[in-house]
Image (cartoon, rainbow, N blue to C red):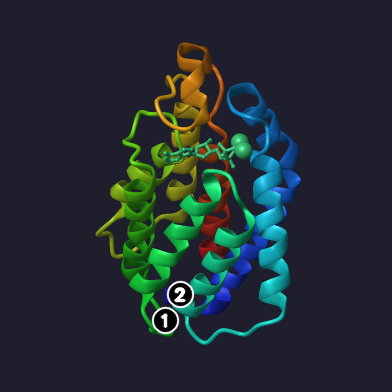
Amino acid sequence: MSITAEHLRTWLERFHDEILEHKDELTDLDQAIGDGDHGINMARGVKEMHKMLNGKSFDAPGDLLKAVSMTFIGKIGGASGPLYGSALMKMASRASSDETLTEEEWINVLEAGKVAIQQRGKAETGEKTMVDVWAPLIERFQKQKEIDWQLFQTTAEELMQSTKEMHAKKGRAAYLGARSVGHIDPGAMSSYLFFKTLAETLQE
Ligand code: ADP
Ligand code: MG
Ligand code: MG
């Protein structure tokens, strides 16, 4: 399939809906191991994104990603704002000005986002952060010519669940040490929603 700016718009509007639907759950997870604002931070970001998207049209996926990155950097705040924002910023530059992307190219765009998150936050896998969803998911599907989006989605869900038993080593949850075990990482959950809504959009 060839991926256009319109696909990305549909995807990110779904992401907006899912974040608002799960806002309290994200906040509860962050209450357990952080400062209880992840749902609030993400909801603020996606609402601004929704407004911004409604006022603009985009010819290329990269143009849309760039605009969303600016909104996220400006509006989400916390640790997660700069992480999602720089991911989308690097995804925009990897997408360049091409008007359509193949699935293989699109996975490379996602990979640029993963690299940006790790450069910025310095987290490795196993440290109970959003990296535990981004990194193994993208590594698993990279270099495939066609993606099984259903499998992509279930893999993202399993990776989110896998953070439950991890001991946090990065972010605020690291202050809790072993007491962070037993709770899903909030950023892993919002990242799961990011990839789930992507998979749903590209499956159609
Ligand atoms: P804050 O911790 O500043 O309140 P949020 O609550 O919005 O910010 O986001 C918390 C999430 O950010 C965590 O659940 C985790 O997934 C992610 N996170 C925090 N620090 C890092 C890091 N260094 N690398 C990757 N992800 C991180
Ligand atoms: Mg927080
Ligand atoms: Mg905070």
Give the CA separation, mark 2 to mark 1: 5 Å
> In screen coordinates, is 64 left or right of 18?
left
Check whether the beta carbons of the residues at disc 2 and disc 1 lie within 8 A of each other. yes
Disc 1 target residue: 100
Q: Quadrant of the C terminus?
A: bottom right
Does dot 1 land on a helix, a strand or a loop? loop
Q: Residue 99, how many percent across, how many down?
A: 43, 85
When the figure is inspected, residue 29 is found, relative to residue 4, above or below; the finding is above
Query: Nearest the camera: 87 or 172?
Result: 172
> In screen coordinates, is 162 left or right of 119?
right
Quadrant housing residue 197: bottom right
Q: Residue 190, how many percent across, how many down?
A: 57, 44
Does dot 2 land on a helix, a strand or a loop? loop
Q: Residue at x 65, y 49 (%)?
A: 42
Q: Residue at x 36, y 55 (%)?
A: 116
What's under tag 1, amino acid-wise? Thr
> In screen coordinates, is 112 left or right of 143?
right
Q: Few, some or many C-alpha atoms within 10 Å of disc 2 (few <14, some 14-19, many ≥20)?
A: some
When the figure is inspected, residue 75 is found, relative to residue 22, above or below; the finding is below
Query: Nearest the camera: 202 or 52?
Result: 52
When the figure is inspected, residue 41 is found, relative to residue 67, above or below; the finding is above
Disc 2 target residue: 3
